[in-house]
Amino acid sequence: MENGIIHNRDIIMFGLQPWDIAIGSNFKNMAWEMAKHNRILYVNRPLDRITAWKNPAEASIKTRKESIKKGLRILEEIKNNLWVLNPPVMLESINWIPPGKFYNYLNKRNNKKLAAQINHAAGQLSITNPILIIDNDFFNGLYLKEFLKIDCMVYYIRDYLLSQSYFLKHGILSEPAIMAKADIVTANSIYLAEYAKKYNAHAYYIGQGCDVNDFLNAPKDFPKDISTIKKPVVGYCGALISSRLDIDLLILIAKQKPQCNIVLIGPEDNDFKKSALHSLTNVHFLGSKPSAELPAYIHYFDVCINPQAVNQMTIGNYPRKVDEYLAAGKPVVATATDTMKEFAACTYLCNSAQEYTSAIETILEKPVDENIIRERVSVAKSHTWEASIAKLYSSINKLNAISDAGTR
């Protein structure tokens, strides 16, 4: 062990984020980082019957079916020290069943079927006494500790899933149970770490990484659809979803700051499409953009905003877009949440439309300060996956230290 880094360990990773989703996934990035020093078996979420029936054309569904029916692509080496397992097993879809003994029996059976495939793959790779890290899956991961031969279990929580009805039905019992069962719970936000501490004293905030390199430098030319919009520009990049963003807050900002153009970049849900924002002449919807183009748009903004709706779904979310804004050196005005405390020294945190407009006015009236810009960039650069995994390793080392002390 060097500088707290855990070396030459076998680690099994399983959870809600399969390997074949978008590149920016938390769990996938964590696997890449840990594979620098350890052997990683990354277990994709197994297929269940209803998902297979509802989404037969999805690439990930086809891959799982090939693994089950044809024995193809079951265990793939992605790079040195990193393997991905597509479990060749079909699980029963049981979320519709009421809580109780029958559901518990079927869920435990699903876990046992999955564990058998993990154990088989672990045997092929000669994995022994691994660390098990479960990403947010309190259904298919609930009994894995019992069925796998592991050294310790880490439950990683990155979203408050109980805010969604699908997960709430059984998760209200399963998530506290898996956190209590885990040796360690780690969270990507302060809020979620405090939530986890209700069920496990060994709960730690480990932050989150963000690849900010693409946002550091301004482009030579700006995209045509934004370069014609008159400054000052107040902008937001990200999915425009009413459950996550406060539409009324955006309307008030636009009305109270008519001299500013509000630019919103991202796909809209139906509430946004039907909102009064579309009737305001200083609000511009530019639609979805490829991720490679987003830095150019952010660099055109004079002020970046994160107008979150405050609810159970959003209050614990780590705001990766704030890191991206700061990496571009931009001033940020955001809704005050527990998670945003991490950014309190370099952003303007607000609780109302009036506070938002006052912060925007303050920013636009101030001369550009290169020292402040450098500080923003420095904060964004500090939020790396290397730093986050170092905190994860530290939490595991604390557990080891406690265990060692208990055996003396």
Image: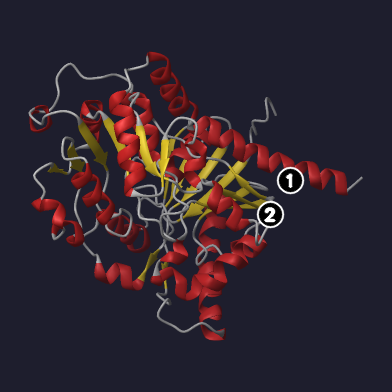
Q: Which residue does the image show at 23% across and 64% down from the upper left?
A: 56
Say which element carries label 2. loop
* Front in this rendered view, residue 29 or 230: 230
Quadrant where the N terminus sits is: top right
Decide which of tag 1 and tag 2 comes sooner along the chain: 2
- Residue labelled with disc 1: 399
Figure coloring: secondary structure
- Residue labelled with disc 2: 183
Amino acid identity at mark 2: Asp
Q: Which residue does the image show at 24% across and 65% down from the upper left?
A: 55
Q: Which residue does the image show at 44% across and 69% down from the upper left?
A: 167
* Front in this rendered view, residue 301 or 248: 248
* Front in this rendered view, residue 90 or 158: 158
Residue 346, given in percent of the width and then of the height, sits at 45, 30
Alpha carbon of mark 1 to alpha carbon of mark 2: how far? 8 Å
Q: Give the left or right position of residue 263, taking residue 52 as reference.
A: left
Marks 1 and 2 close (CB-CB < 8 Å): yes
Q: Is residue 307 visible?
A: no
